Image (cartoon, rainbow, N blue to C red):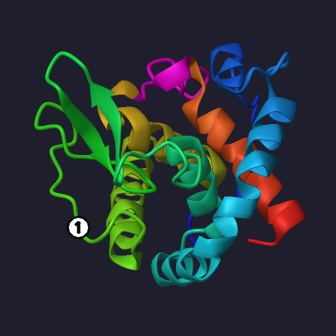
Amino acid sequence: MGYGDIMKVETSGASMRTAQQDKLRESGVTASHTMAKTDAGRMEKYREKINKVGHKYGIDPALIAAIISRESRAGNVLHDGWGDYDSKRGTYNAWGLMQVDVNPNGGGHTARGGWDSEEHLCQATEILVHFIKIIREKFPNWSAEQQLKGGIAAYNMGDRNVRTYDNVDGGTTGGDYSNDVVARAQWYKKFIGF
């Protein structure tokens, strides 16, 4: 794939905050792998779409699966396709398996396609590729794998918040977004063959 080798990206895995969502007692790569495995059965119904979209955009399908796992637990935590509920506004902020941000104060995207459709996966993957390219331009001296990890972090929190590689997840949800997603992607690639 053209954006670096997901298997060569350094990762510390999930934070304790993220791991506790599944009542896990450990954090790190082991926790990320456990969560990916939990979602693996549900992920199978999306495999064909994930592979097709990954190949279309040059993104490793394992990475798309990992984002789906992190964002929506392979659709398991969505409410009619919606997620990230804002109790103050009484609305949902994100749409679909990969949780495209529709909040006007956030990503401000218009949801495309059904929540589990190929069209949705294309939209979200286009957003991911956009952020990887921005991080490439912003940090031309980073390796392709570092740029990929930075792009994953930016997918969660925007590119302005990616300032250094050492603290790439400093402003991400759980303080671990790219590290957790990378670890899940590595598991999906190695053990499930995405």
Position of 93 with respect to 75 (left or right) is left
Residue 169 belongs to magenta span: yes
Q: State the residue at coordinates (59%, 46%).
A: 73
For this orientation, the residue located farthest to the front is 80
Q: In the picture, residue 17 is in which quadrant?
A: top right
Q: Is residue 24 above or below residue 127?
A: above
Q: State the residue at coordinates (83%, 67%).
A: 192
Pick the quarter of the image with the N terminus: bottom right
The percent position of residue 12, horizontal first and vertical second, equals 76, 28
The percent position of residue 130, horizontal first and vertical second, equals 34, 58
Could you say which is closer to the camera, residue 26 or residue 115?
115
Please state the total of marks drawn on the protein image. 1
User: In the rendered structure, which segment of residues is drawn in magenta?
Assistant: 162-174
Residue 95 belongs to magenta span: no
Q: State the residue at coordinates (49%, 78%).
A: 53
Q: Which residue is mark 1?
A: 112
Position of 160 with respect to 164 (left or right) is left
Q: Secondary structure at mark 1?
A: loop
Could you say which is closer to the camera, residue 15 or residue 142?
15
Q: In the picture, residue 176 is in which quadrant?
A: top right
Magenta stretch mostly in which secondary structure? Answer: loop
Q: Does the image show residue 141?
A: no
Q: Does the image show residue 11?
A: yes
Give the amino acid type for the residue marked by disc 1 in the picture: Arg
